[in-house]
Image: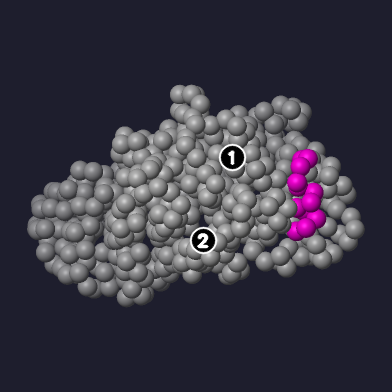
Amino acid sequence: MAKVIIEPWTPAHRSLCWRLADAYFACRGIDAWTKGEIPHDATDNYGMARQHARFLAEHAAATASALAEVWVLEVGSGLGQFAANLVRALEVDTGDAGRALAPRLKIVLTDYATKTVEQAAESPNLAPLVARGTVIPALFDMRHPARLVDLAGAPLSPPPLTAVYANYVCCVLPPRNLQRRNDRWFEQLVQLSAEVDGEGPAADARELLSDPTRDSLLEELTLLWGWRPVEPAAALPSGIHTEVLEATAEALPEATISYPASFIDFLVAFAPRLSPSGVFIISDYGRVERGMLAGLTDRKPQIYGNSLAFEVHFPVFDAFADAAGWSILRTDDRNRSLHTALLRAGGAFQADDVARFDDSYRHAHQGEDLVDFYDIAMRAADDEEFDRAVRFYRRCVRLDPGSAHYRYKLADALADSGDHARALAEAMRSRELPGAKDHDFDFLLGRIHALRDDYGAATAWYERSLQLEEHQVTLTNLGTLYEHDRRWGDARAAYRRALELQPDYQRAIDNLASLGEDAP
Ligand SMILES: C[S@@+](CC[C@H](N)C(=O)[O-])C[C@H]1O[C@@H](n2cnc3c(N)ncnc32)[C@H](O)[C@@H]1O
């Protein structure tokens, strides 16, 4: 193996990296999210869904007939969690307007990755919504906006759309990274090298793309970044882009701009599918003040799985709206972790649009709160500050009362905080919730009962847990309970089995040693 250049200096948006990202999304399916490779909680958590649900319910009430179906579409839907949470939030957390809208809502759930859409549509959260016709799975590549098809490949023509959602999608479309240095422009280039067999760039590229889901493949490539002079008109597709770029950089003698050319082309091409009051709702991370684009800065992507993401430069959308005669509302507090922009082709937003936007996005932050509270709670639990962990998990539960996950974490932290009675009540209540099967409530109940010195109940719950998954910790905990009951043979068998599962599991090694081979 030798380090070889597999892609010479190339404009960054045309790099092989993007083909690798396409291949990664095409092959990985929903494991990209469920295995924690692609972050998604900020855009699709229930708190964020409540914000979107409020906006959509009020917007639909103001703009659509009270009896008609309301059609929305999501691009780059990934795991599909957003759609499931949006429906739940409308049904249970958005008052009369939400309840009135929920049965009339149709969500066209699209992604360009067939496997992802198919798997998402079959997931427990979405399958019932697909079965009842609320969610319509479909394929859509934003780079080819004329083609919207169902999973069988038949063209789809939904009625005029009330909203189009783009969550964490603008950031994954290759931007044109451009720098203004006084009166000259430069475009970003990248050169790729990797440790490969070295049979020539084409063969090496083929080898790279042969298994795009390989762990850390993109991270193992060496990416060198550079800049070369360019005329904006040559760096950008034809159309409105040069004007938008120049307007974004106006009065910034030096600026570095991630220009979302393909996303803007998608907006323009797709706009005719929206109703006259229809809106694009873009949620992403990035920079919101034009001043934040000033200066000559590096533009490096975040790498998630084998995909790339560039932070979104929202001021470009202001310039686009201006140049195209569209209207825009957007959040602009630079300290927020997720920003939302509302774009509509034509006509200025009215005062009630602004009020709805402010109520749901500018002044609302349940989505970010959920992410922040959860993060604080997890850190507190790691630091054994269990009372603090309990307080913040409680805040998560308040924001997402139907989540078995937050309630599991709350019960676990309550147990560690010493509040065993509340831990028990919380765990017993929560194990009935949808999604509870993803958590080992039986193990948790075993632990809580053991902490309450109710060893009989603890044994029973641990044994139930073993029926779902044989785990060395459960076996070892059970072993100690068997010892307490003087069931030496059962204890020994439990420790031995734990050590078959994990030969270096120290607690089982120690317990087995202290039990001794000779105990009756
Ligand atoms: C970072 S994920 C976001 C997923 C989801 N919207 C969320 O908020 O978690 C980006 C998604 O965009 C999809 N995607 C990437 N390029 C696309 C394109 N050209 N057209 C449509 N979807 C695309 C990927 O398959 C992936 O599902």
Task: Examine the structure image and report whether residue 240 is included in the region drawn in magenta.
Answer: yes
Q: Percent x, y for residue 323?
A: 73, 53
Residue occupying image coordinates x 74% and y 56%:
257
SS at circle 2: helix
User: What amino acid type is highlighted by mark number 2?
Assistant: Asp
The magenta segment is: 237-248
Residue furthest to the right in view is 183
- Residue 44: percent from left, percent from top: 44, 53
The dominant secondary structure in magenta is helix
Left/right placement of residue 276 relative to residue 9 reads left
The image quadrant that residue 497 belongs to is top left
Tell me where residue 349 sits by quadrant: bottom right
- Mark 2 residue crowding within 10 angstroms, few (<14) / some (14–19) / many (20+): some
In the picture of the structure, the residue carrying the numbered disc 2 is 353
Q: Quadrant of residue 4?
A: top right
Residue 283 in magenta stretch: no
Residue labelled with disc 1: 272
